Amino acid sequence: MYLHHETATEEEIVCLCARSTSARNVIHELEGGHSVVRISKDAVVKCGFGITKEEADNQAQAYSLINQAIIRVPRVYRFFTHKGIGYIVMEFVDGESLNSTADISIC
């Protein structure tokens, strides 16, 4: 099941990101219970306790400042909380995560 990030309700996003959802398309599990869940071909949701509006705002600021031809920062579409869990809906950027790069000298 895919959702369009512009028209999906917060409730639909929460349901699709729930660990109990069999349709949940997890791209990456992060420390502390954070997850990145793909909700469409061009959008993902980073969710979990400790995901904050400040993080979403910082990412949006980085997106506006960084030359996207050099390094890709996903565009933030929206942020919301539900029962204490933060949800950042953002652009899906295909490629290798810097977290998985063996050569730490590039970071």
Image (cartoon, grey):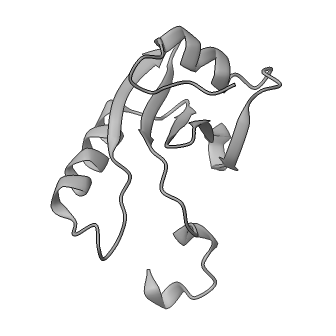
Q: Percent from the top left, x then y, of residue 85?
A: 53, 22
Task: Work out whether 20 lies above or below 59.
Answer: above
Image quadrant containing the C terminus: bottom left
Task: State the residue at coordinates (37%, 64%).
Answer: 72
* Left or right: 55 in relation to 5: left
Out of 24 and 54, give the one closest to the viewer: 24
Task: State the residue at coordinates (66%, 22%).
Answer: 16
Q: Percent from the top left, x then y, of residue 51?
A: 46, 35
Q: Quadrant of residue 54?
A: top left
Task: Work out whether 61 lies above or below 15.
Answer: below
Out of 31 and 44, give the one closest to the viewer: 44
Q: Percent from the top left, x then y, of residue 61?
A: 20, 50
**In the orientation shown, which residue stands out farthest toward the left?**
65
Task: State the residue at coordinates (55%, 20%).
Answer: 13
Task: State the residue at coordinates (32%, 31%).
Answer: 53
Image quadrant containing the N terminus: top right
* Left or right: 61 in relation to 86: left
